[in-house]
Every structure is written in C-alpha cells, then in structure tokens.
Amino acid sequence: TLDTKQFITDKVAEIQEAVGNETAINALSGGVDSSAVTMLGHRALGDRLRTVFVENGLMREGEAEQVVNFFRALGVTVEVVDAREEFFAALKGVTDPEEKREAITQTFYRNVFGRLVRESRAKCLLQGTILTDIDETVAGIKRQHNVFEQLGIDPQEAFGYRIIEPLIQLRKDGVRKVGKALGLQSELFDRIPFPGPALAARVIGEVTPQRIATVRGATTVVERLLKGTGAFQYMAILHEDRVTGMRDGKRDFGFQIEVRCWDSVDARTATPTRLSFEVLQALAEQIHRDVPGVVSVTYNISSKPPSTLEAI
Ligand code: XMP
C-alpha cells in the first residue's frame, strides 16, 4: 500500500534534485494527475515553477476559469495561454484517430509548449504521466499523448527539454490519494478522469470548433446529471454519422450523441453503469433541449474490453 506522506517527501526531494538551481514549467489541465504534479512541483520549487493552462479550444465549458480559481485558492498562480487557433488549424481535415492524437501531441509539445519552454528558459518540464498511460501505449492499445521514452523518443532531443514524471509509479487511485494528501479540494482530486486530447477524444471524425461546441454542450448535461452516480467516468461522444430526426415538425438530418458511463477502478477494465431508465430519459431530454442539432441520444452498453473508455 501507498504511504502518501513518504511518497510526497521523496518526490519533492527528487524534483529539487533534478531541477537544481534552474527553473521548471508544467502544464496544468485541472485533471487529478496534472493537479497533483502542480502541487508537488510548487512544494518543491515555489516560484521557480511556472504553471500554465493551455486553452486548446478542446476543453469543457468554463474549465480554464474554474481551474485558475481552484489554484488561486491554494496559493498557486496559473497562467492561461490561448492556443485555440493553433490546435484547430492542426486538426483541420484530420479524421484518423491516431492522426488526431498525433496532431494534438505535436501542437502541444512542439509548438505551443516548446515555445513557452524556450521563452521561459525552463530546463525541465514536470508532467503527470501515470503507469496506466505507459501500459496502454506499450501494449499498443492507444498512444497516450504524454508517453515518449517507451516509444524511443528522447524529449531532450525532440523538444529541447527534460521531462520529469513524479507520478509514473502510480495508477489513478494512487494519484487521488496523493492529491488529497497534498491539499487539493475534493473537486480536484475526486474529479472524473479527462483525457489529454480533451473533447477531441470524444469526436468521431473531423474536429472543428462547431463539432467541439456540440460535444461540449452534451458533456455539460452528462456531467450535471451523472455527477451523483459515483461512476468512475461519464461522457458524451459525437458521432460522424448523421441520422434523420424531427425538429419543429420538420425532418432534420441531425447529430447523434452517445452517452457512456463507466464503473471501473483503474480504467484497465470497465463496465457500463446500470443507470435507471428515468436518468437515461432525462439525459436525452436535456441534451435535445440544450444542444442544437442533436436528434438522437444513445447509451453505450459495451464493456472494456473490447470497448475503450474514450471514443478515439
Ligand atoms: P481508454 O479510452 O484508453 O481510456 O479506455 C482509459 C483512461 O485514460 C483516459 N485517457 C487519456 N488520458 N491522455 C490521458 O491523459 C490520453 O491521451 C488519454 N486517452 C484516454 C481516459 O479518459 C480513461 O480515463
């Protein structure tokens, strides 16, 4: 079992040793992994750690603001960098799931973050990679956006900076315990997982600002209604196929949203949550009401494997 106190002491010392008298930078998404890394990094380095929230245009409603406010309350300043245009430009016309993930990785690490690291003269990047990310990448299940060494990529050579990964031995449940011990509010350490590629992992086919807006609207409904379920993760997915529906008494060739809600301990396996029919109906009604153009809402009843939690 994990001794969180000892873990924190060890990691703070490791970060201090690795960074020395230099400065470091980290990207905070507000997920439990990057939030725990932010707290560890600030304990270790104080003002020598610059924390940035990259607004990639793929985040959920109000997310940047919420994360900045949470961390302000913890005494940590978070800078928001607007990179929306760059991400959408890189994603234009890309439909293959792995190519989408690659476009996001490249835009993040090489363009946006590479530029920030060079500007700030930081020598190290602190990153919240966890064990499950490595497992799945090595197994060839999915290329996680933050795994390099296991794929033979040297970040120093590829991007010009070192990467420190203090959470690499932990899985999600361990990170939550450490996050709690680091003083994160339950809104942060108890948040459902959200992927690095953000809402782009929930859009099948091309990722455009309009399609992201659709899946974002549906995500807001799903998170509001399923927050109380205690499920491991829940999400909305936008399909590429259009379906015929009715809107204002007319035929409407509209969008199709799939809802997924998972019971899982560590994301390696998962089963769909047995939501009541009333909850399922409320999901459909509120998505139809709040998200323009959606004419069909479905609930996914597959398990992982063979399914995976995210759509891409
Ligand atoms: P899958 O879809 O592989 O998801 O069953 C397993 C867990 O990992 C999250 N996930 C990611 N997390 N970067 C991340 O940091 C990613 O690229 C990524 N892809 C999936 C997913 O949300 C789930 O919790």
Image (spheres, helix red, strand yellow):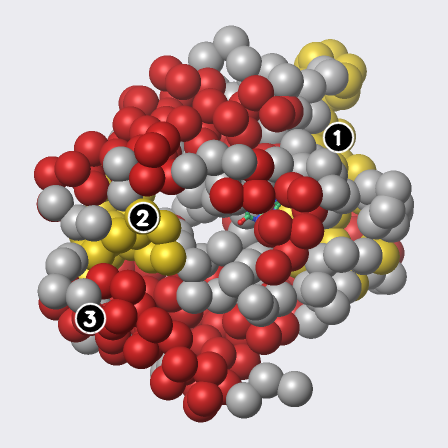
Q: Do the residues labelled 1 and 2 touch (CB within 8 Å)?
A: no
**Residue 154 vertical position relative to residue 210 in the rendered view, above or below:** below
x and y, in percent, of residue 49 in the image: 19, 62
Report whether 73 appears left or right of 282. left
In the image, what residue type sits under mark 3? Leu
x and y, in percent, of residue 246 in the image: 74, 20
Q: Which residue is drawn at 37% across and 85% down?
A: 9
Question: Quick one: label 2 or label 3, which is nearer the N terminus?
Answer: 3
Q: Mark 2 points at which residue?
A: 162
Q: Quadrant of the C terminus?
A: top right
Q: Residue at x 54, y 29 (%)?
A: 101
Q: Nearer the viewer, mark 1 or mark 3?
A: 3
- Tell me the distance, in whole angstroms, between the alpha carbons under discs 2 and 3: 16 Å
Q: Mark 1 points at which residue?
A: 296
Report whether 206 appears left or right of 236. left
Toward the viewer: 3 or 63? 3
State yes or no: Cβ of the residue under disc 2 lies below 8 Å from any atom of ligand 1.
no
Q: Tell me which corner region of the image, top left, top right, bottom left or bottom right, holds residue 288.
A: top right
**Residue 83 vertical position relative to residue 183 in the rendered view, above or below:** above
- Whether residue 294 is visible to the viewer of this picture, yes or no, is no
Circle on res. 45: 3
Q: Which residue is drawn at 62% across and 73% down?
A: 173
